[in-house]
Image: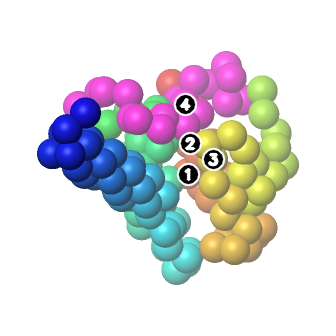
Amino acid sequence: MTPVSRALRTLALAATFLAGGLLQAEDKKELPKFDGNLQKYWADACARCHGVNGNGRDNNGGQLPDAGFDFTDSRKANKKKDSDWVKVTLNGKDKMPAFKDRMSEADVQKMITEIVRKFAAKH
């Protein structure tokens, strides 16, 4: 390998690692703290993965990259107790981040009853 090709290879590897780090940082954007507005918080924090309509899809119907649970699937959603959803929301699970530092348990319960449960009720 020539010095020039070695330098190009090193530069390409460095660019790959840098891009990967930037993409990872972008994916893990800091989630906002809850400000008391359930609808706004759903749109700002939850819709990233669950979609505006709770179905894990974008506005064009495409699957979101980190699609979360489809709350519009009433058979699956209604099998879960509110306490299950509260626990997952506060502590996180799989790709779902923990919200315990952003929302109180009471706020999460309110989100479940006033937003999440209504997605399943519509279908």
| Numbered tag placed on residue 70 in the rendering | 4
Q: Is residue 73 magenta?
A: yes
**Split into 4 quadrants, where in the image is the N terminus?**
top left
Q: On the picture, is 86 further left or further right than 111?
A: right
For mark 3, give the secondary structure: loop
For mark 4, give the secondary structure: loop
**What residue would you read off at disc 3?**
96
Q: Which residues are magenta?
A: 59-78
Q: On the picture, is 86 further left or further right than 18?
A: right
The one of 13 and 107 positioned closer to us in this rendering? 13
Q: Mark 3 or 4 closer to N-term?
A: 4
Determine the CA span between mark 2 and mark 3. 20 Å
Q: Is the C-beta separation of discs 1 and 3 under 8 Å?
A: no
Kind of residue sitting beneath label 2: Lys
Q: Mark 4 or 1 closer to N-term?
A: 4
Q: Is the C-beta separation of discs 3 and 4 under 8 Å?
A: no
The one of 10 and 89 positioned closer to us in this rendering? 10
The vertical placement of 98 against 103, above or below, is: above
Residue at the image position 47 percent from the left and 38 percent from the top: 66
Kind of residue sitting beneath label 1: Ile
Kind of residue sitting beneath label 3: Met
Determine the CA span between mark 3 and mark 4. 13 Å
Quick one: which residue is furthest to the bottom in this view? Answer: 35
**Camera sees residue 13:** yes
